[in-house]
């Protein structure tokens, strides 16, 4: 997968009436039947005309009643005001609404979707969105093509929350996974990331116990071959993950 093919915006038809604009930042618009929803709203306000043209080539943007934000980082919300202004859409995220633990359903005559809160994994206000009829899962930034979704230093409780979130996402057995950024994938990549993370933790712990220096450990632990094509993984995500895990192991904060 060449960087250009991933990073140039393209419209992917997930199913009839279900479209993803895939680029560095992803968003989607979905025909629910009697109305439509949008999931996530990009980082650049200047993409407004492009995005509305793309939507208009599939269905009337005025049918959009809700914009669901997987979280409220600025690279997921830039076009929220444009959807409010042009379509009268209601913005739904964990800052604007209380969403019950078992989720808020958006029922349509054609399909339904549920928004589930997953706070404390990537941000304090994460949600995933599951569209059962298409077995499509929006992970927001919980899946980052090899990136540990938790920003900052790892702690045992944060690691537990990340792994619990992955277990839940994998349980849906999604055929289409729409991450917040980069290419789409499926349940296999979610499972592979959990294996990678657990294996990395073990490798680092063993290397620390064996008395290796940080420099030796970073040198020794290479990115797995089968993940070499993962988006931006070899370039920096593996090293970033390794550094975070190493830091946590040295602090005694990765005991599982
Ligand atoms: Zn984010």
Image (spheres, rainbow, N blue to C red):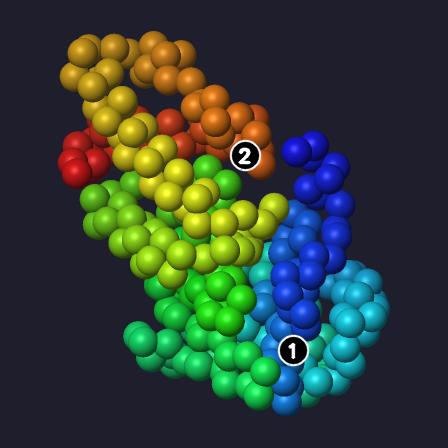
> Which residue is tagged 1?
31
Q: Specify few, some or many for label 2: CA neighbours under 10 Å numbering under 14, 14-19, or 20 or more.
A: some
Q: How many marks?
A: 2
Q: Residue 214 or 33: which is nearer the viewer? A: 33
According to the picture, the residue beneath numbered tag 2 turns out to be 230
Q: Quadrant of residue 20?
A: bottom right
- Whether ligand 1 has any atom under 8 Å from the Cβ at mark 2 is answered as no
Secondary structure beneath label 1: strand
Task: Inspect this view and state whether residue 121 appears.
Answer: no
Drawn side of residue 51 relative to residue 208, left or right: right
Q: Position of residue 210 (x, y in %)?
A: 18, 11
Q: Position of residue 11 (x, y in %)?
A: 73, 57
- Picture residue at 24% right of the left edge, 27% below the top: 202
Please say whether residue 102 is visible from this viewpoint: yes
Closer to the observer: label 1 or label 2? 1
Q: CA distance from mark 1 to mark 2?
A: 30 Å
**Rendered residue at 55%/79% (across/down):** 111
Q: On screen, 7 above or below 118?
A: above
Front residue of 226 and 181? 226
Q: Position of residue 37 (x, y in %)?
A: 61, 77
- Image-quadrant location for residue 75: bottom right
* Mark 1 or 2, nearer chain start: 1
Image quarter where the C terminus lies is: top left
Q: What residue appears at the point 44 percent right and 44 percent down from the top-left corner?
A: 188
Q: Secondary structure at mark 2?
A: loop
Report the side of 233 relative to 156 (left or right): right
Q: Is residue 171 above or below residue 8?
A: below
Is 60 positioned to the left or the right of 214 in the image? right
Query: Where the N terminus falls, by quadrant?
Result: top right
């Amino acid at each position: 997968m060449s960087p250009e093919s991933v990073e140039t915006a393209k419209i992917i038809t997930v199913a009839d009436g279900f479209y993803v604009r895939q680029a560095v930042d992803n968003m989607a618009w979905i025909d629910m039947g009697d109305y439509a929803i949008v999931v996530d709203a990009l980082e650049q306000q200047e993409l407004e005309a492009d995005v509305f043209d793309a939507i208009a080539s599939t269905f009337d943007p005025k049918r959009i009643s809700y914009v669901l934000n997987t979280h409220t980082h600025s690279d997921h919300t830039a076009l929220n005001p444009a959807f409010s202004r042009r379509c009268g859409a209601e913005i739904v995220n964990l800052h604007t609404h209380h969403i019950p633990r078992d989720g808020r359903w958006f029922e349509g005559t054609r399909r339904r979707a549920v928004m589930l809160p997953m706070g404390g994994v990537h941000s304090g206000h994460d949600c995933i969105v599951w569209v059962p009829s298409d077995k499509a899962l929006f992970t927001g930034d919980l899946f980052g093509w090899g990136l540990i979704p938790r920003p900052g230093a790892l702690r045992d409780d944060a690691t537990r929350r990340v792994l619990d979130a992955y277990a839940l996402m994998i349980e849906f057995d999604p055929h289409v996974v729409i991450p917040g950024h980069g290419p789409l994938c499926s349940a296999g990549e979610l499972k592979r990331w959990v294996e990678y993370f657990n294996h990395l933790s073990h490798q680092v712990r063993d290397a620390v116990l064996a008395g290796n220096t940080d420099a030796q450990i970073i040198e020794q632990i290479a990115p797995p071959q089968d993940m070499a094509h993962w988006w931006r993984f070899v370039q920096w995500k593996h090293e970033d993950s390794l550094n975070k895990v190493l830091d946590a192991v040295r602090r005694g904060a990765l005991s599982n």
